[in-house]
Each structure stands twice: as structure tokens, then as C-alpha cells.
């Protein structure tokens, strides 16, 4: 039982915020692709798949960062970093979760399966982008948003341009919230040589976060309007924009704990966007 508890901590089951940040864009895509009437079997498959792949990604991230995490205050006591589990166990957990996730989509069409392979490759390589890429959060946004094209593929058998535009919007959202997250560890990351957007943006970090939020909302609005969404959708975006302004009040002084609070609060921002989409369809 102790091992299972350690594995649960490895895949962050005690911190479901990551699952939710993947899930809201995926659900938005499912609703848009199905004109507001998604097959509930698809909703179940993508919800479970999102949880499994986020968990697998956490295990691989800890494996890749095991030599860095011990130097970061927030991550030093993670199961792998602290030596409570072995590196091969993290890889095994990630592999098992990825296989189970793939089994979930076996009933779906070929395009969805092909996109799932790309999703696994992107998720597996993300941890290594922090070694050389100045804004790895942008790559994270692709990994966290790949449920968008997969959702359209599962529903429609193709991926329209709007889906790729939504994925681009998700990249900007991820840069916003993960920069807030990176602001927490900036001092440690500078010492160990990890590249993050918080370091790259420097003194313009707060402005960059707010600009990324703005671009996200513009893209979401354009796509939603294209799909005929109006009142409830705009209201949902307005609530989300209000949350973004609240995040500004949290991060403007660059206090570590308030930056972390802003990051976690993005769950509600994503929920507001999805609620606007779902309500707009439901109220027709």
C-alpha cells in the first residue's frame, strides 16, 4: 500500500489541477465538434484518457528532471527525487498508464489513434525542452491542448482549421498560467540552469502573462463566433477575463505564494470558458 501511495504522489493524484487544465480545452473541443451534443461515451473516454495521460506525463517529467528537482525547494521531496522509488519504477508507471490510455481509444477512428501517437511523443519530450528552449511553456501548451484536435478527429473524422486555431489559443493560455507557475521557482531555476518563460520574459513577465491571456480570449472568441455561439458564450469569456484580471492582482508583486495561487486559479478560468460554450448550446 505504501508503494501505491508513492505512485499516486508520483503522478500527482493529490494535485488534480493539471488534469483539469487539460480537461477543459478537451471538453470545449468535444462540444464544438459535436454542435453541443457530444456522445457521452466520447466524453468518458476523453476524460479518463486526459487523467491517464497527465499522470503518465508527470511520471516522465519526474524521471527526466530527477537530477534537477533535488535542487528546487518545491520538488525536493517528490518520491523519485527523494529516492523513495527508483527511476525504472517511474518509467514503468508512465508506460502502463500510456498503454491503458491507448486501449481506451481503440474503438475510435484511425485518425484519432494517429494523433494519440503524436500526443504521446509530445508529452514524453516536453521535459527535455526545458534544457534548451527559451519558452518551454509553449511546447507544454501543445501537449496540454492535443486533446483538441483529437476530439475533432473522434467526432468528425477530420481536424478543421478552427481546431488548430483553438490549439494555438491553448498554447497562449498555457504560457500564461505556466509562467505564473514558473515565477514560483525562478530563483531555483536560475541556479540550476533550467530555462523557463519567467526567466526569458524577465521584468516583463507580468505583462507577458496578461498579453497571453488577451490573445487566448481573442482566439476563443473568434472560434466561438464562427461556430455561432453568442450570449452565454460571451458571458463565459467575460467571467474568464475577470479571473485573468484577478490573477494580475496576485502576480503583480511577484510574491511566490500568490503567483502559485494565480496558477491554481486557472482551473476556474478554463471552467468559465467551457461553461459558456455548454450553456450557449444548451439554451438554444
Image (spheres, rainbow, N blue to C red):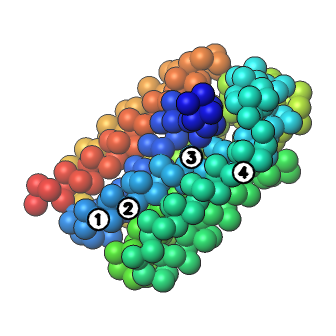
Instruction: Calculate the distance from the C-alpha at mark 4 to the C-alpha at mark 2.
Output: 24 Å
Disc 1 to disc 2: CB gap under 8 Å? yes
Q: In the rendered image, which quarter is residue 4 located in?
A: top right
Q: Which residue is mark 2?
A: 45
Which mark is in front, 4 or 1?
4
Report x, y in % for residue 219: 45, 58
Instruction: Calculate the distance from the C-alpha at mark 1 to the C-alpha at mark 2.
Output: 6 Å
Q: Residue at x 79, y 29 (%)?
A: 83
Nearer to us in this view, 66 or 264: 66
Viewport quadrant of the C terminus? bottom left
Q: Is residue 87 above or below residue 43?
A: above
Report x, y in % for residue 272: 32, 41
Q: Earlier in the sequence, mark 3 or mark 4?
A: 3
Q: Which residue is mark 3?
A: 55
Instruction: Calculate the distance from the C-alpha at mark 3 to the C-alpha at mark 1.
Output: 21 Å
Q: Which residue is mark 1?
A: 41
Q: Earlier in the sequence, mark 4 or mark 2?
A: 2
Which mark is in front, 4 or 2?
4
Q: Secondary structure at mark 2?
A: helix
Report x, y in % for residue 13: 51, 36
Q: Which residue is mark 4?
A: 91
Q: Secondary structure at mark 4?
A: helix
Q: Residue at x 19, y 51 (%)?
A: 279
Q: In the rendered image, which quarter is residue 61 located in?
A: top right
Q: Earlier in the sequence, mark 4 or mark 1?
A: 1
Instruction: Calculate the distance from the C-alpha at mark 3 to the C-alpha at mark 4.
Output: 12 Å
On the question of residue 139 being in view, the answer is no
Disc 2 to disc 3: CB gap under 8 Å? no
- Mark 2, other Cα within 10 Å: few <14 / some 14–19 / many ≥20: some
Amino acid at each position: 500500500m505504501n508503494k501505491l501511495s508513492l505512485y499516486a504522489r508520483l503522478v500527482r493524484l493529490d494535485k488534480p489541477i493539471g488534469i483539469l487544465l487539460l480537461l477543459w480545452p478537451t471538453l470545449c473541443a468535444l462540444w464544438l465538434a459535436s454542435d453541443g451534443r457530444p456522445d457521452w461515451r466520447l466524453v468518458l473516454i476523453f476524460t479518463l484518457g486526459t487523467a491517464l495521460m497527465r499522470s503518465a506525463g508527470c511520471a516522465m517529467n519526474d524521471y527526466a528532471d530527477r537530477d534537477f528537482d533535488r535542487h528546487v525547494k518545491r520538488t525536493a521531496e517528490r518520491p523519485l527525487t527523494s529516492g523513495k522509488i527508483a527511476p525504472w519504477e517511474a518509467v514503468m508507471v508512465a508506460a502502463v498508464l500510456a498503454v491503458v490510455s491507448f486501449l481506451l481509444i481503440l474503438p475510435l477512428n484511425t485518425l484519432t489513434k494517429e494523433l494519440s501517437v503524436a500526443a504521446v511523443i509530445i508529452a514524453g519530450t516536453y521535459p527535455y525542452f526545458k534544457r534548451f528552449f527559451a519558452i518551454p511553456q509553449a511546447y507544454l501548451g501543445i501537449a496540454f491542448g492535443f486533446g483538441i484536435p483529437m476530439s475533432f478527429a473522434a467526432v468528425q473524422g477530420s481536424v478543421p482549421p478552427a481546431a488548430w486555431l483553438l490549439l494555438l489559443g491553448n498554447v497562449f493560455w498555457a504560457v500564461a498560467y505556466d509562467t505564473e507557475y514558473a515565477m514560483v521557482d525562478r530563483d531555483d531555476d536560475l541556479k540550476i540552469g533550467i530555462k523557463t518563460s519567467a526567466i526569458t520574459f524577465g521584468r516583463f513577465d507580468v505583462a507577458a502573462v496578461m498579453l497571453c491571456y488577451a490573445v487566448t480570449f481573442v482566439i476563443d472568441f473568434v472560434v466561438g463566433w464562427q461556430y455561432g455561439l453568442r450570449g452565454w458564450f460571451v458571458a463565459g469569456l467575460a467571467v474568464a477575463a475577470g479571473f485573468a484580471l484577478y490573477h494580475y492582482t496576485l502576480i503583480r508583486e511577484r510574491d511566490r505564494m500568490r503567483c502559485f495561487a494565480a496558477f491554481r486559479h486557472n482551473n476556474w478560468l478554463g471552467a468559465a470558458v467551457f461553461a459558456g460554450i455548454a450553456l450557449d448550446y444548451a439554451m438554444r
